[in-house]
Image: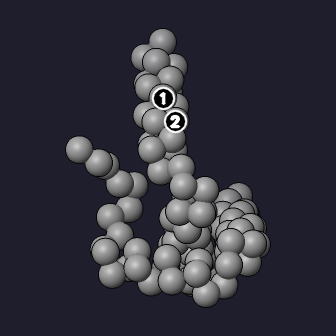
Amino acid sequence: MKTEIINFTIEQKEVMDKAISKYGDLSQRIKTNEELAELIVSISKRMEYFWLKTDRDYESDIRQSVIEEIADVLIMLYQTIEIENCEKEVYDVINMKISRLEERILK
């Protein structure tokens, strides 16, 4: 049985596959890097908010930014996996890393 990190619909996968075809591998790799960088910035702002306890109204904006950037990254990671044709390998490594994490937690 195949387990997916995010259960994209067939239609969503088709759109993402069309993006790869239209824009090309290199462009989508660059876009993946951009989205990863934007997620890092959003998470950093979220951590800064917790350290400094700035304006409470700003908290929901920061959280929403993190959510949007996570979505962008997941979309781009799906495309990266498709470009690299490495879905099985990624799942195998995820399983190995989670098993290793479990071992560390139980120590």
State yes or no: discs 2 and 1 in contact (Cβ < 8 Å): yes
Percent of width and height locating residue 74: 52, 66
Secondary structure at numbered mark 1: helix
Q: Would you identify the image quadrant in which residue 84 lies?
A: bottom right
Decide if residue 92 is on the left or right side of residue 56. left
Label total for image: 2
Residue farthest along the bottom direction in this orientation: 22
Read off the residue under disc 2: 93
Percent of width and height locating residue 54: 69, 73
Question: Taking the image as drawn, is residue 49 in sight?
Answer: no
Q: Which residue is depicted at the point 53% across and 50% down? A: 86
Percent of width and height locating residue 51: 71, 58
Decide if residue 27 is on the left or right side of residue 89. right
Q: Which residue is depicted at the point 51% across and 83% down? A: 18
Residue farthest along the top direction in this orientation: 107
Read off the residue under disc 1: 96
| Residue 53 higher or lower than 14, as above or below | above
Secondary structure at numbered mark 2: helix
Q: Amino acid at mark 1?
A: Met
